[in-house]
Image: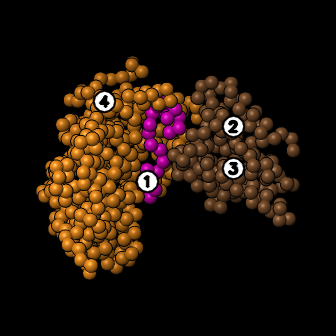
Amino acid sequence: MNISIDDIQKEIIEDFSILDEWDDKYAYIIECGKKLKPLPQEYKNEEHLVRGCQSQVWLHAEHKDGLVYFYAESDAIIVKGLISLLIKVLSGHKAEDIVKSDLYFIDKIGMQSHLSMTRSNGLASMLKTMKVKALLFLEQEKAN
Amino acid sequence: MGTTTQTLEHNLDLAAIRRQFPILNQQVNDKPLVYFDNAATTQKPLVVIDALKNYYQKDNANIHRGIHTLAERATADFEKTRDTVKEFIGAVHREEIIFTKGTTEGINLVAQTWGRANLKEGDEILVSGMEHHSNMVPWQMIAQEKKAKVIIIPINDAGELLMDEYEKLLNSRTKLVAVVHASNALGSINPVKHIIQQAHRHGAVVLIDGAQSTSHLDIAVSDWNADFFVFSGHKVYGPTGVGVLYGKRELLESMPPYQGGGEMIGEVRYDGFTWNELPYKFEAGTPNIADVIALKAALDFISVLGKQNIRSYENTLLQYAYTKLESLEGIRFIGTAKEKVSILSFVFNDIHHQDLGIILDKEGIAIRTGHHCTQPLMGRLCITGTSRASFAVYNTIEEIDRLEAGLKKAIKLFR
C-alpha cells in the first residue's frame, strides 16, 4: 500500500488549485474522462449498470489480495472524468479504508453540484455503489 | 455578439414584457441568465405574482359555502377564472371547465372515470408515438385493468403523425384517441381538428393534450369538437399546481366522480351520497384557490399581448435559432415538422446532451437535456435524449446569439 486515500485527494485538490477558470477545470475533467480506460464490453450490461436519469454509468469491482479495484465508464464525458477521479482516489485500497473514507475533494474542487439530486446523472449512485461494494467485500473478509 | 444580432419586426414591446419577469434579471454563474427551458415551465409575470400576493394579503377565505365577505370575494374571483378559461379555450359552457392540479391530473381523471366506465375487453385506445409519458401511462394503466389495448399512431422521421396510418387504425373497437396538440420533445403541431373529425366518424372520443400548445396557439375546443382538452397553468405563465380539464358537458355528466370529499357532494347520509352538479362534481376538497385566481392573470397577460403576435414573434425566434445553429459542425435537429411551436431539439453524435447542458449552465444558459419524458419517442428516433431550447415571448435574438456562443464553447471543450 503506497499512497493513502487522503493523500490522493490532497494531490487532486492541488492539481485543481492552479486552475482558476471553470472552463479550465472542466477541460481537465474532460481530459481525465478521455483518458479513462474503457470498461471491457463484458461488464457493460444491466448487472453493472448504475442507473441515472440522463447518463449511464457501468461499474465493476474486484477484490484481490485484500484490496478493492474499481473499473467504470459512462456515456457522458464529464461524468466519465469525475468517475476517473473517484477511481483514482478509491481504487486499490483496503475495503475498510474505502468504507471509512470521506471524499472531501469533490467539494474542494468545486464539483459538489454533480453529486446533487437534481443532476440525476448517476454519479451520486455510483459513489454509493462503490462504498456498498467495499462494504460487502469487508463483510466477506470478516466472514473468512 | 453585437455584429451578429439582427433586428426583427414584431408588434411586441419586449422591454416592457421583460420588465414583467423580474426573475430574468439575474446572474447565473456570473453571466446574465438566459432562460430557454420554457417548455418545462414558463416564468411568471408580475401580474401573476401580484395576484397571488393580493389574494393572500386581502382575500384569503375558503370558497363556495362561506357566508362572510372574504369568502364571497374569494369565490367570485375563483369563478371568474372559470369564465376566463372558457373564453380562452373557446368552450361553450362554464361548467365544462374543471380545475385540476395540471395536465397529468386531467388525463388521469379522464382515464380513471370515463375510462373505467366505458372501456371493456378488446377495446382500443389510440395514442400517438410522440406522447409525453403523462398521456401514455394513464392509458396503459386503465387498459391493463380493462384488458383493452393501447395502439400507437406512428410518426415519420421528421416527427409528424402519419395521418393515413391513423385513419387505417380507426375502427369500431376504437373508443378513445389521445393526442398531443404540440409535442414537448419535438415541437410538432398535430392537426387536431382533423384528428377529432376522423375519430368521431368511428364513434371514438378524443382527448387533446394542450400542455405545450396553450401558450402559443389558438385553442378552440368547441370549433374542433374536442371531447376533452387539458393544459397546465405553469406552462402558460401561470402558477404551478393548477391546471384545467375541459370536457363536453354531456360527457362530464355521464362520468362518475374522480375523488370523493367535500365540495363534490350533493347530499351525504350514513348509507350513501349523491353527487354535486358540474363542475363541482370533479372538484373534491378545498381547491387550489390562490393559484386558480392567479391563472386568470396569466391568461389575461397572454390575451393582452395577443396570441397571433406571440406566435409570430416566437416563430421568428425559432427560425433565427435554426439559422444560427445549423452551421455548428455535427449538429442534427430532432423534430423537423412543417408546423412547429418554438421548441428546438438537437443532438451531436459525439457529445452527450448532459455534457452540453452542464457547460451551457456554466454560461448562464438554461436548456433541458434528456428524454423529455418521452422514452418511447426517443426509442423510435434511435436516440437516448436531446438538448432542447424552448422559447417564450420574453426571449430575445441576443439570447439566441448567446446560445450559439455557448454551444461553440462547449464544442471546443469536448472535441
Q: Residue furthest top?
A: B3
Real-space CA distance between mark 2 and mark 1, rounded to the nearest whole angstrom: 34 Å
- Image mark 2: chain: A
Marks 3, 4: nearer the viewer: 4
Counting residues from the start of the chain, the first of labels 1 and 4 encountered is 4
The residue wearing badge 3 is A72
Residue B7's image quarter?
top left
Tell me if mark 3 has few (under 14), some (14-19) or many (20+) residues whose alpha carbon lies within 10 angstroms of its own. many
Q: What numbered label is drawn on residue A105? A: 2
Real-space CA distance between mark 2 and mark 3, rounded to the nearest whole angstrom: 19 Å
Marks 2, 3: nearer the viewer: 2
Q: Are marks 3 and 1 on the same chain?
A: no
Element marked by disc 4: helix
Marks 4, 2: nearer the viewer: 2
Identify the magenta region.
B357-376
- For the point 62% across and 60% down, which residue is it? A46
- For the point 47% across and 31% down, which residue is it? B28
What is the number of callouts on the image?
A: 4
Q: Amino acid at mark 1?
A: Cys
* Placement of the N terminus of chain B among the 4 image quadrants: top left
Does residue A121 sit above or below A3 in this rendering? below
